[in-house]
Amino acid sequence: MKKTFNNSLLVLITGLIIFSCRNDNVTADEEGEIYASKLVEIKSVIFSRKNNKISNGNELTELYRGLFVKKTPGKISQYTDEEEATLNSKISIVKNDIYVKVPYNQTLNIDKLGTLNATISFVKAPDNVILTEHPVSKISETVNSMSVEFPVTIKRYEFSHSNMLVGITKYIKFSKKVGSRNSKKIYKIHFKYDDNETKLSNCDLFPIDTKKDAKISNFSFTTDYKHNGPKVNNSYVCENIHSGSKSECSNLSKSIIVTPVLTKDITVNSGDSETNPIEMHFDGGVLSGSATIFNDTSKAFDVGHLNGDKMETGKTLPNFSFIADGSILPDGAFFSIEDLKGTNCNESFKQRICPRDPSKIFKVENQMPQADNGIVFKVVAQDGITQKFYKLIFKNKYDVYYLMEINKSTKKS
């Protein structure tokens, strides 16, 4: 009887042990997921300048620059070690989620496919784990070191102002097959505007204590600047000197950098509206007989049309196209022409002041005497609210006397 009881107890205990070790509801994939929690653990993610340069160059990719407050100009020298450290210090990791905080930028709209190259560091070196971009990627790398470089693919228009308001998410997958188990671990990288950022309000194109006739050095134009093919910022026939015609200019010394000057002193309310903009101007030279005389070519563009002028064979006329390639704006600030109307922009035989973004190609011609044509624009601060209005005038070398001479010539003919 005692032996029978002991045998029964042994069977019962064995049955309990077998039952407790089995779980028919756990699949091989789920077993892999359980193992995956130990597969890899990310310690940090950083984005560096050295890994995000344009191929064969020393300039930063547009995507990388999009991780910082907007800078004009956007040259590599404008991005410091301190700013890079600040960017990376704000990247946080919560479980399987990586959060990258992006500065507010209303002009953000990158229209090209590209990559952001990240350096991923681990708590401990993974054991031959496969790293890929999820869900589909041609990039696959075996990881067995404490850190790895990984390109995060960003699609066209994915890095845009509207997307950063709500955020975008990219995925990184780590996987490894152990026996029959298919283990994987997916991390999400979230790019979104920094909700705790204090947006900048500086929208001054130049210091407000700048005096009348002072050169605006941070709003410069490089002569014969090559922009997407054609040369811009070229003056009229004075740049193509040949003697014995109206193309000849006196005292011409071609300047490499041309800057406008402040037309009048700035007051408290200057620049507060389109009708009260801060005005700058370029000199246009003075006609003297058949020649155009310049006092200082470093602050002048000749954009007039000389009556009856004929160019020598092989010479070329300018295209009257300009761009402020040497502009320097406060961090976060940008040019805008939103809601600007201009004055007589589409009219003939009147002064024309047209809304134009000076960071993009614009045209100006002066063919009517005493009509100094130009452009009007705004500089808007990073906050998208604070703004100032500016006007840039190209002075006209034609005066009333010239008009009278033209009229006399017309009547005689």
Image (spheres, rainbow, N blue to C red):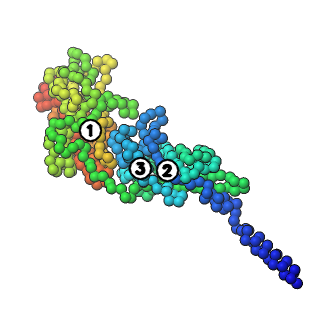
In this view of the protein, can residue 327 be seen by the observer? yes
Pick the residue in front: 245 or 285.
285
Check disc 2 and report its element: helix, strand or loop.
Answer: strand
Check disc 3 and report its element: helix, strand or loop.
Answer: helix
The residue that appears at 25% across and 27% down in the rendered structure is 255
Question: Which mark is drawn over residue 87?
Answer: 3
The residue that appears at 19% across and 32% down in the rendered structure is 283
Q: Earlier in the sequence, mark 3 or mark 2?
A: 2
In this view of the protein, can residue 411 be seen by the observer? no
The residue that appears at 22% across and 37% down in the rendered structure is 216
Rendered location of residue 316, percent (x, y): 31, 23
Q: In this view, does 384 lie above or below 53?
A: below
Q: Which of marks 1 and 2 is nearer the N terminus?
A: 2
Q: Are the two marked residues, 3 and 1, in contact with CB atoms closer than 8 angstroms?
A: no
Q: Which residue lies furthest to the top in this view?
A: 244
Residue beneath label 2, please? Answer: 45
Residue beneath label 1, please? Answer: 218
Check disc 1 and report its element: helix, strand or loop.
Answer: loop
Rendered location of residue 30, percent (x, y): 66, 62
Name the amino acid, label 2: Val
Name the amino acid, label 1: Asn
Pick the residue in front: 142 or 314.
142
Q: In this view, does 174 lie above or below 214?
A: below
Badge 3: how crowded within 10 Å, few (<14), some, or many (20+)?
some
Mark 3 to mark 1 CA distance (whole Å): 27 Å
- Number of the front mark, 1 or 2: 2
Direction from residue 349 to residue 336 in the image, left or right: right
Mark 3 to mark 2 CA distance (whole Å): 11 Å
Badge 2: how crowded within 10 Å, few (<14), some, or many (20+)?
many
Direction from residue 335 to residue 15 in the image, left or right: right
